[in-house]
Image (cartoon, grey):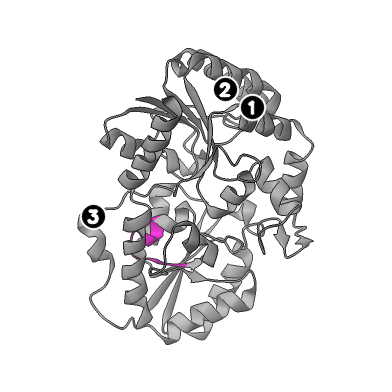
Amino acid sequence: MKILLIGEYSNVHWTLAEGLRHLGHTVTVLSNGDFWKNYNRDISLTRTNSKIGGMIYTMKLIKLLPKMTGYDIVQIINPMFFEIKAKWIFPIYKYLRSHNKKIILCGFGMDYYWVKTCCDTMPLRYSDFNIGTHLRNNKDAIKERQDWLGTPKEHLNKYIANDCDSIVTGLYEYYICYKPYYSDKTTFIPFPIKLEHGQCNTYIKNKSVYNRIKIFIGINKTRNEYKGTDIMLKAAEQISKKYSNKVELIKAESIPFKQYVKLMIDSDILLDQLYSYTPAMNALQAMAKGIICVGGGEPENYEILNENRLKPIINVLPNYNSVYESLERLILHPELIPILKKQSIEYIKKHHDYIKVAQQYESLYNKITQ
């Protein structure tokens, strides 16, 4: 098949493209590299934040439109799949619809159905937008509600979701937001991770006890409170202060992906997304390298994967004490670390291997193109 993947989110589309190419498909990735993360892509379309930058971006986009035709599958990362206003995406979507065979919408992150569900029916015990039945009122949560509810973005998301041939969700959280509305065309497929099969064992030190444990945290200053990084960082700093002879805390602040990986790769523990039920791409990429994820590992995450044995994620509740106590347990019981490291790699091999995931996408593509 000839496949076009538009947009990027934490290397999902590029990794999927590699898997699909391995299966013999012709795949093109068109994206901005996920902004400052600068992931690989075949066609680059980036924008600078200025009026002139917007004009140049629009001109480039118009010139690229003829290259976005004649595909068996066009998969868009989000309803806002280009860096222009929602009202201008409508005609571009319709152009793609009329010049390609099938369109797939991804439910991979921020969109109307995610915001609406978390703020309205609240099926999740906690999320980016709610704790129990209470709405979170940090500035990012408020901004996203204003951005997606009762706006052109909402109308665009609804239109595409109704019109597209299939909706793919990558996490349990997003699956339960789309499934009630589009039960007939919503599919859950895990995120793809490319493992370095010959090097997996090198990520696990050949000893049963860790004398100095490295804790890694990535910090995006613009989303600190929203993602719970502020709480996780505070707990990690207190742990590293209390156990200064046993712990090393490594911080990475808004840096490109390749540099980020270099800082992360020697770590033992990753702190990631306090309000998540599941590990997303950042955590999954770390787990593939034998790094233990402290973050989202609720029972629902394992249930949607039909996993009853491998449970390597240290699940934390969205509060300081839960993070602190979870870290302290690992520090005081370092014999658990090599066990969890091995399980983390096995978990990724079993559920997220990029070729296995590409095969699931291939099955979906075959189903909707028949």
Q: Position of residue 197 (x, y in %)?
A: 23, 55
Q: Which mark is residue 57?
A: 2
Q: Which residues are magenta?
A: 285-293
Q: Which residue is mark 1?
A: 84
Whether residue 34 appears in magenta in the rendering, the answer is no
Residue nearest the viewer, comparing 19 with 215: 19
Q: What's the amino acid at mark 2?
A: Tyr
Crowd class of label 1 (few under 14; some 14 to 19; many from 20; radius 10 Å): some
The residue sitting at 23% across, 75% down in the picture is: 206
Q: Are marks 1 and 2 in contact (CB under 8 Å)?
A: yes
Residue nearest the viewer, comparing 286 with 312: 312
Q: Looking at the image, is mark 1 or mark 2 earlier in the sequence?
A: 2
CA distance for labels 3 and 2:
39 Å
Q: Which residue is mark 3?
A: 197
Residue 254 to residue 107: above or below: below
Quadrant showing the N terminus: top left
Q: Position of residue 234 (x, y in %)?
A: 60, 72
